[in-house]
Image: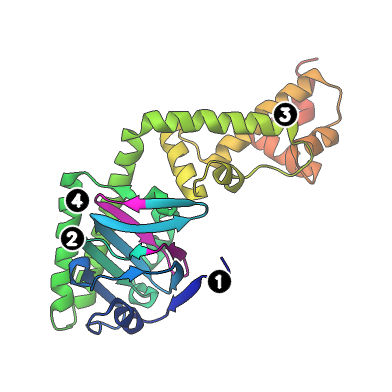
């Protein structure tokens, strides 16, 4: 991996040169059709990092991306999201899809707008490559209309309202993406029910065998499930109403109750067994979840 070629895209002008297209019409954002980008094929894989937010609508994409140890093909209409400083690895072969859109936004373009804060809360910018948004035909048409509106504005001379109009359309785009991701979670509920069972098994195994080795985290679970922590939490939130961390705490408290009522271990010993560094932290969480201290809970069974 250390021998991979590496490209760091720092400006929109640099990005357009890399794409082989004309200079951007705006210094802080651009939108291009993949149809208008010259066809390029990589002879070797390389890492790419950019300083921008990017949203790509990929249609009929023979290109391949690698995330972790897995490789992903995109041959249908999908939306992918990339945050600034996010590294992706492009495999040998075609670089760009046959059609679609690429929206690139420098963080400074959003700086004085509420969207600058909101975009940092949008989970899909933290999703893995394989967790892209799969669009239905109708959804794809709605998304394409927004890209077309942004493109029209991009080509007009800049005036007092230009940035406001573009920002409004970007916000609309993200609102639709949130709606469609919610739909994706619902329509894949059978798959995610299996995911919930896997989470339960992992947590049970942890609390039965991994004593004194630190508390499990959402990142630990996500790593074992080959998912991003944010996507895992969003899936679980849709299924159970709880995030991954909340489920971890729930399972931990249930296991703590079993130990408290079936052993004579001290609270400090139980805290260590469950992975807490300090017993006070265990006491605080237990009381927060049950309205009782561990000692009070144990005494209620005597």
Count the numbered circles shown: 4
Q: Where does the N terminus fall, quadrant-wise?
A: bottom right
Label 2 or label 4, whichever comes before in sequence order: 4
Q: Are marks 4 and 1 in contact (CB under 8 Å)?
A: no
Between disc 2 and disc 4, the foreground one is: 4
Residue lying at 73% horizontally and 22% vertically, measured from the top left: 258
Label 1 or label 2, whichever comes before in sequence order: 1
Q: Position of residue 112 (x, y in %)?
A: 35, 75
Q: Which mark is residue 145?
A: none
Q: 33 or 211: nearer the eye?
A: 33
In the image, taking residue 214 as reference, residue 243 lies left or right, namely: left
Q: Position of residue 70 (x, y in %)?
A: 47, 50
Q: Are marks 4 and 3 in contact (CB under 8 Å)?
A: no
As helix, strand or loop, the secondary structure at mark 2 comes to helix
In the image, taking residue 195 as reference, residue 25 lies left or right, namely: left
Residue lying at 43% horizontally and 62% vertically, measured from the top left: 120
Q: Which residue in the protein does label 3 denote?
A: 208
As helix, strand or loop, the secondary structure at mark 1 comes to loop
Q: Which residue in the protein does label 1 denote?
A: 3
Disc 1 crowd rating (10 Å Cα; few below 14, some 14-19, many 20+) is: few
Q: Which residue in the protein does label 4 denote?
A: 140
- Check the image and name the residue furthest to the front: 43
As helix, strand or loop, the secondary structure at mark 3 comes to helix
Marks 4 and 1, Cα distance to the nearest angstrom? 38 Å
Label 4 or label 1, whichever comes before in sequence order: 1
Label 3 or label 2, whichever comes before in sequence order: 2
Residue stretch in magenta:
73-92
Q: 231 or 102: nearer the eye?
A: 102
Query: Is 83 covered by the magenta stretch?
Result: yes
Q: Which residue in the protein does label 2 denote?
A: 146
Marks 1 and 3, Cα distance to the nearest angstrom? 42 Å
């Amino acid at each position: 991996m250390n021998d991979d070629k590496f490209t760091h895209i720092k400006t929109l002008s640099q990005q357009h040169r890399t794409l082989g297209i004309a200079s951007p019409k705006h210094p802080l954002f651009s939108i291009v059709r993949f149809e208008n980008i010259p066809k390029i094929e990589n002879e070797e894989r390389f890492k790419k990092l950019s300083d921008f937010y990017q949203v790509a609508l990929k249609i009929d994409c023979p290109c391949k991306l690698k995330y972790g140890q897995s490789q992903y093909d995109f041959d249908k209409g999908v939306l992918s999201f990339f945050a600034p400083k996010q590294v992706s690895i492009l495999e040998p072969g075609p670089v760009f899809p046959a059609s679609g859109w690429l929206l690139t936004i420098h963080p400074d373009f959003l700086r004085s707008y509420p969207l600058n804060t909101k975009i940092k809360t949008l989970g899909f910018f933290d999703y893995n490559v394989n967790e892209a948004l799969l669009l239905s035909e109708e959804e794809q048409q709605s998304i394409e209309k927004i890209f077309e509106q942004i493109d029209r504005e991009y080509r007009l001379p800049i005036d007092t309202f230009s940035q406001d109009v573009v920002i409004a359309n970007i916000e609309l785009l993200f609102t639709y993406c949130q709606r469609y991701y919610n739909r994706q979670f619902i329509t894949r509920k059978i798959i995610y029910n299996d995911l919930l069972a896997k989470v339960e098994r992992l947590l049970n195994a942890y609390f039965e065998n991994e004593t004194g080795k630190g508390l499990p985290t959402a990142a630990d679970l996500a790593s074992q499930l080959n998912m991003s922590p944010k996507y895992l939490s969003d899936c679980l939130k849709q299924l159970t109403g709880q995030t991954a961390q909340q489920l971890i705490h729930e399972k931990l408290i249930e296991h703590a109750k079993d130990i408290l009522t079936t052993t004579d271990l001290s609270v400090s010993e139980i805290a260590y067994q469950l992975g807490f560094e300090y017993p006070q932290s265990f006491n605080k969480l237990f009381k927060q979840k049950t309205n009782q201290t561990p000692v009070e809970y144990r005494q209620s069974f005597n």
